[in-house]
Amino acid sequence: MNILYLRADTEQNLIDALPFARGVDFDSNPIWIRATHDFTLDIIGALSNDDATVDGNGEVVTQPAQKPGFHANLLCTDAIAATIPNEIIVIPPPTNIKRKWA
């Protein structure tokens, strides 16, 4: 299995890059397919930097800045990995991974 760290400019860009991970619910609303025998998808969405400031009481003074992009992690087979447009959305493994596979 491959672990891919993904970042697209927008959620729609990620949807376009992962058509195999889209489906519809019972009311025909579009949804993310989170797991099959071939992949497991962890949608993270927006991430924030660690630059918030807090006062002496622990109250947030300034909110953290948002990192660019819409993020997800994908655990998948070689066949699925081969369909991902690597040059567009696959990023190197982060040094400060926010969520890890168990």
Image (cartoon, rainbow, N blue to C red):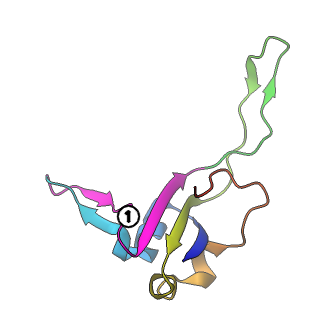
Q: Residue at x 58, y 50 (%)?
A: 46
Q: Which of 38 and 34 lies nearest the eye of the viewer?
A: 38
How many numbered badges does the structure rendering display?
1
The quarter of the picture where residue 12 lies is bottom left
Q: Which of 37 and 31 lies nearest the eye of the viewer?
A: 37
Q: Residue furthest right?
A: 56
Q: Residue furthest left?
A: 27
**Residue 18 location (% of width, % of height):** 42, 74
In the rendered structure, does residue 52 fall within the stretch colored magenta?
Answer: no
Q: Residue at x 77, y 33 (%)?
A: 52
In the rendered structure, does residue 30 fall within the stretch colored magenta?
Answer: yes
**Residue 22 location (% of width, % of height):** 32, 67
Give the amino acid at mark 1: Ala
Q: Quadrant of the N terminus?
A: bottom right
Q: Residue furthest top?
A: 57
Residue holding disc 1: 35
As drawn, is 44 to the left or to the right of 15? right
Q: Which of 51 and 76 lies nearest the eye of the viewer?
A: 76
Determine crowd level at label 1: few under 14, some 14-19, many 20+ residues with C-alpha closer than 10 A: some
Q: Quadrant of the C terminus?
A: bottom right
* Magenta stretch in the rendered image: 27-46
As drawn, is 91 to the left or to the right of 24? right
**Residue 67 location (% of width, % of height):** 69, 52
**Residue 56 location (% of width, % of height):** 85, 13
Element on which disc 1 rests: loop
User: Considering only vertical position in the picture, is 52 above or below 21?
Assistant: above
The quarter of the picture where residue 26 lies is bottom left
Q: Residue at x 59, y 79 (%)?
A: 88
